[in-house]
Image (cartoon, rainbow, N blue to C red):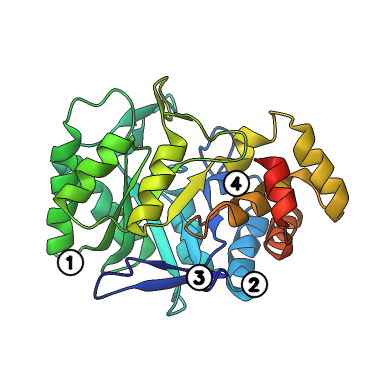
Amino acid sequence: MNTNEITIAGKSNHPLNVKRFGYGTMRLTGEGIWGEPANRGEALQILKRCISSGINFIDTADYYGEDVTNRLIAEALYPYPEDLVVCTKVGGARKPDKSWIPFNRPENLRTSIENNLSTLKQEQITLVHFRVIAGGDVPFKESMQAMFEMQKEGKILHVGVSNVSPDELNTAMAIGDIATVENMYGHAQRNSVQLMYGGETRGGEEVLAICEENQIPLIPYFSLFQSMPKKDERISVIARKHGATEAQINLAWLLHRSPWILPIPGTSSLLHFEENLRAADIQLSEEDMQFLA
């Protein structure tokens, strides 16, 4: 395996080869992941810099903003480079009070897919994650069946899942081919994964093990958001050794932890974007990884 690249849906007829370092757009929105960015010009500049730097995997959702990141992506990058994978998520929505709610009924998912297609100016979405959000009353299996039905219709090329437990991941794989998993994971968030927008916890390492066994890329979200506030002196030691920031070492650790991990650090600062990008060049030794284990 080329450790600088990762293959998504490698067993399918339409595999996707992407650089093993992507970009998550959530931070491009306004405060509270709502509304327009504080610096719209910088947001567009970051998206364009993704392409010029070689990044060809961008993560988004129509409930970021609302629909702010999708509109920014289309404005900055359409018509899209041939190798660019714009990955979106469905399963959630926002209320006027900015709270997060499940939006996971089959008709809800279809509405979200049509919305993403329209805003992103696409006829087919390359990769879509079904995001599990606490409080939904629709069985997980029913939502997944709706996702695979839209795949059969050609609206979705590849189906992924997000915020899933090991049992849910196994259930999804029994229904159809799962291309990717997007779960909370990071150096300080490995043994349990908090269910986003809810209090339930789910096994992070167990999900990674299933992904590795089935050659499914794991896309960690909140890897810095969770890891940075939880000060770990070991990270500080390795950062000093490599002349790097602690954020960079957290990202480098992900890249070295498993060849099936595809980090997507997000930021609204071009300066921080460039700093995150340099993390891909840091070579951690076996001793470094054992020290950070």
Closer mark to the observer between disc 4 and disc 2: 2
* Distance between mark 4 and mark 2 Cα atoms: 22 Å
Q: Is residue 36 left or right of residue 238?
A: left
Position of residue 160 measured from the top left corner of the image (x, y, whole percent): 31, 52
Q: Earlier in the sequence, mark 1 or mark 4?
A: 4
Ranked by sequence position, the earlier of labels 1 and 3 is: 3
The amino acid type of the residue labelled 1 equals Gly
Residue extending farthest to the top is 199
> What's the CA distance linking mark 3 and mark 4?
17 Å
Residue 53: which disc?
2
The amino acid pointed to by label 2 is Ser
Graded by Cα atoms within 10 Å as few (under 14), some (14 to 19) or many (20 or more), the crowding at tag 4 reads: many
Work out whether mark 2 precedes mark 1 in sequence or the reverse, and give the earlier one. 2
Judging by the rendered image, the residue that carries numbered circle 4 is 37
- Distance (Cα) linking label 2 and label 1: 31 Å
Left or right: 220 as drawn, with respect to 63: right
Q: Secondary structure at mark 3?
A: helix
From this view, report whether residue 201 is shown above or below residue 246: above
Residue drawn where x is 45% and y is 75% of the image:
80
Mark 3 residue type:
Leu
Which residue is found at the position 63% from the left and 41% from the top? 224
> Where does the image place residue 245, in percent across and percent down from the top left?
80, 48
Q: Nearer the viewer, mark 1 or mark 3?
A: 1
The image quarter containing residue 235 is top right
Picture coordinates of residue 150, whole percent (x, y): 16, 57
Gap between marks 1 and 3 measured at Cα: 23 Å
**Dots 2 and 3: beta carbons under 8 Å?**
no
Disc 3: which residue: 77
Callout 3: 10 Å neighbours few (<14), some, many (20+)?
some
The residue to which callout 1 is attached is 154
Q: Residues within 10 Å of mark 2 (few under 14, many from 20)?
A: few
